[in-house]
C-alpha cells in the first residue's frame, strides 16, 4: 500500500471549515483513499473514501487532485465534537484481504 | 444493532499469564482483524482473517494467536503475556471486495501487563 504523509496537528475554530491535507504521491491506479477518525481513544470511525472523483457525504467532503497524489478532507462546519485524530489511508482493493495501514494521523483541535 | 463487540474493556495481567480477548460481530462480515495501538501511535495490524478457518499474520503477530471457527467470532489469544504487550487492542470487521468496504471497529480493550 502507498504511504501517506499528514501534518501532525491542526487547529480550527468552531463553525469554520477544517481542511485536512494528505500526500500519497506513490498511490497506484487501483488504490482508494480512505479517511478515518479516532475520537479520544475510541475505535476508529469511517468517514469517507474515494478513487478519482471528489466525494461528499453527510460527514465530510473528499477532494482528490487530478494526479491523485494528494487529497484533502473537508469538514465544512467543524464542531467541538470533531476534535479527533484523522487518518488518511491508501488501501489496495484487490478483492482479497482488505488491510488498513494506519500512520500517526493529524490531530485536529477544534476550539471556540 | 450491536456491530463489533469487544470484551473485556479493561484487563490487567501479570507477566506470563494467558488470556483471550473476545471479538464478535453481527454483520456477517467475512473479514475480521485485530490491531494494537500504543500511546501516540497509529494502529498496527496483528492478525486478520478473510473467513472461517482462514487466518494470516499482519505487521506485528509475535506473541499472539488467533482462530476463526465461525464468521461471527475472532478471538485473540495471548499465551504468555509480556509488558511489551501493554496496549489498547481493537477488533475490526468488514465485507471483502474491491473498493467499497468500510471497516467497523470495536471500542477497544485496554490491556496492562505488569
Image (cartoon, coloured by chain):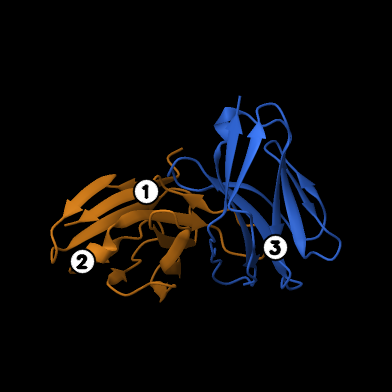
In this rendering, is residue A75 above or below B34? above
The image quadrant that residue B114 belongs to is bottom left
Image coords of residue A50 (percent x, y) = 73, 56
Residue projecting furthest to the right:
A66
Label 2 marks a residue whose chain is B
Residues at badges 1 and 3 in contact (C-beta under 8 Å)?
no
Which residue is located at x 26 percent, y 53 percent?
B111
In this rendering, is residue A25 above or below B101? below
Image coords of residue B15 (percent x, y) = 14, 63
In this rendering, is residue B101 above or below B106? below
Please name whichever residue, A94 or B11, is drawn nearer the observer in this view of the structure.
Answer: B11
The colour one sees for chain A in the rendered image is: blue
Label 3 marks a residue whose chain is A
Q: Does residue B40 appear left or right of residue A64 in this picture?
A: left
Q: Tell me the quadrant of the picture where the N terminus of chain A can be found.
A: bottom right
Q: Does residue B36 appear left or right of residue A99 in this picture?
A: left
The image quadrant that residue A5 belongs to is bottom right
Q: Residue A32 carries which label?
A: 3
Q: Residue B82 carries which label?
A: 2
Image coords of residue B36 (percent x, y) = 38, 60
Label 2 and label 1: CA atoms lie apart by 19 Å
Dot 1: what SS?
Answer: loop
Pointer 1: residues within 10 angstroms few (<14), some, or many (20+)? many
Q: Which mark is residue B108?
A: 1
User: Which chain is depicted orange?
Assistant: B
Amino acid at each position: 500500500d502507498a504511504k501517506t504523509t499528514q501534518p501532525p496537528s491542526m487547529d480550527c475554530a468552531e463553525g469554520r471549515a477544517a481542511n485536512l491535507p494528505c500526500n500519497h504521491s506513490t498511490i497506484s491506479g487501483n488504490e482508494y483513499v480512505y479517511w478515518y477518525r479516532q475520537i479520544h481513544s475510541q475505535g476508529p470511525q469511517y468517514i469517507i473514501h474515494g478513487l478519482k472523483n471528489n466525494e461528499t457525504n453527510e460527514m465530510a467532503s473528499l477532494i482528490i487532485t487530478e494526479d491523485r497524489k494528494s487529497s484533502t478532507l473537508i469538514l465544512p462546519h467543524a464542531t467541538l465534537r470533531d476534535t479527533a485524530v484523522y487518518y488518511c489511508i491508501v488501501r489496495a482493493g484487490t478483492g482479497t484481504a482488505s488491510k488498513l495501514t494506519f500512520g500517526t494521523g493529524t490531530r485536529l483541535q477544534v476550539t471556540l | 444493532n450491536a456491530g463489533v463487540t469487544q470484551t473485556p474493556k479493561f484487563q490487567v495481567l501479570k507477566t506470563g499469564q494467558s488470556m483471550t480477548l473476545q471479538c464478535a460481530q453481527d454483520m456477517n462480515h467475512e473479514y475480521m482483524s485485530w490491531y494494537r495501538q500504543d500511546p501516540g501511535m497509529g494502529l498496527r495490524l496483528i492478525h486478520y482473517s478473510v473467513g472461517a478457518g482462514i487466518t494470516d499474520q499482519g505487521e506485528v503477530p509475535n506473541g499472539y494467536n488467533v482462530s476463526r471457527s465461525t464468521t461471527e467470532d475472532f478471538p485473540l489469544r495471548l499465551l504468555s503475556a509480556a509488558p511489551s504487550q501493554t496496549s489498547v487492542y481493537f477488533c475490526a470487521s468488514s465485507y471483502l471486495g474491491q473498493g467499497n468496504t468500510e471497516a467497523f471497529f470495536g471500542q477497544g480493550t485496554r490491556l496492562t501487563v505488569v
